[in-house]
């Protein structure tokens, strides 16, 4: 017991000394130092989801999530869709892609307030029910809008650790899931490395 206490005291002293020397202005317990892999998670940490194909699909892409006034700015670029097609796209409950064939492991739509399904701009909808992705003649789609139903890392509406799912069909806003059918791409939402990000918007 004495030994443990002494060790604890030493650690505490070291921490206090370190803080006093280098970061007297900080109350954090960890130094934010990307060079040591210590990256703080803040309420404005930008997030990224790299979309990978599910099953036989060829759909790929990337979603960035930036802090924005009144919500989260979603900036997405997707390829490999059918020409001139529309696809439902939502945040799903789990950041779990273990089901490579169907992505059922991602769970249902993220819905912290038990709302009915609806599409933007409906205020009451599943959190992170995005507008449909609209593919051009080459099967490419982009999406850029501000979602007021989600947050990056803080609170019950936080999307970090969940997933983005792209569906095979258009989401028509019907109950319970918009009739968007199976899942053709999944991306797990994690902290974005600023060096990999396009210029902040
Ligand atoms: Cu979905």
Image (spheres, helix red, strand yellow):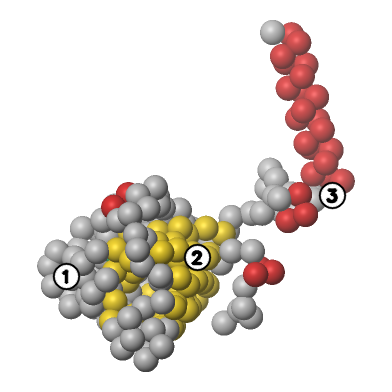
Question: 68 above or below 7?
Answer: below
- Residue 156 placement (x, y as % from top left): 37, 55
- Residue 143 placement (x, y as % from top left): 42, 82
Q: Which mark is residue 179?
A: 1
Camera-side residue of 55 and 163: 55
Determine whether, in the image, residue 200 is placed left or right of residue 3: left
- Total of numbered circles in the picture? 3
For residue 19, say whether it is visible. Answer: yes
- Residue 9 placement (x, y as % from top left): 77, 23
Q: Quadrant of residue 118?
A: bottom left
Q: Earlier in the sequence, mark 2 or mark 1?
A: 2
Q: Nearer the viewer, mark 1 or mark 3?
A: 1
Disc 2/disc 1 C-alpha distance (Å): 24 Å
Q: Which mark is residue 22?
A: 3
Callout 2 touching callout 3 (CB < 8 Å)? no
Q: Tag 1's secondary structure?
A: loop
- Residue 95 placement (x, y as % from top left): 41, 53
């Amino acid at each position: 017991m004495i030994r443990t206490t002494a060790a604890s005291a030493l650690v505490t002293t070291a921490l206090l000394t370190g803080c006093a020397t280098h970061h007297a202005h900080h109350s954090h317990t960890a130094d934010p130092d990307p060079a040591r892999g210590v990256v703080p998670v803040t309420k404005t940490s930008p997030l990224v989801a790299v979309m990978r194909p599910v099953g036989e699909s060829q759909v790929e892409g990337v979603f960035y999530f930036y802090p924005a006034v009144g919500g989260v700015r979603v900036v997405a670029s997707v390829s490999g869709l059918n020409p001139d097609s529309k696809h439902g796209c939502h945040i799903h409950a789990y950041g779990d892609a273990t089901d490579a064939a169907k992505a059922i492991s991602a769970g249902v739509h993220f819905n912290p307030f038990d709302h009915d399904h609806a599409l933007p701009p409906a205020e009451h909808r599943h959190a992170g029910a995005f507008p449909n992705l609209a593919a051009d003649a080459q099967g490419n789609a982009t999406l850029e809008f501000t979602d007021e139903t989600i947050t990056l890392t803080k609170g019950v509406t936080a999307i970090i650790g969940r997933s983005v799912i792209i569906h095979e069909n258009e989401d028509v806003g019907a109950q319970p899931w918009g009739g968007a059918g199976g899942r053709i791409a999944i991306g797990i939402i994690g902290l974005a490395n600023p060096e990999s990000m396009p210029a902040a918007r």
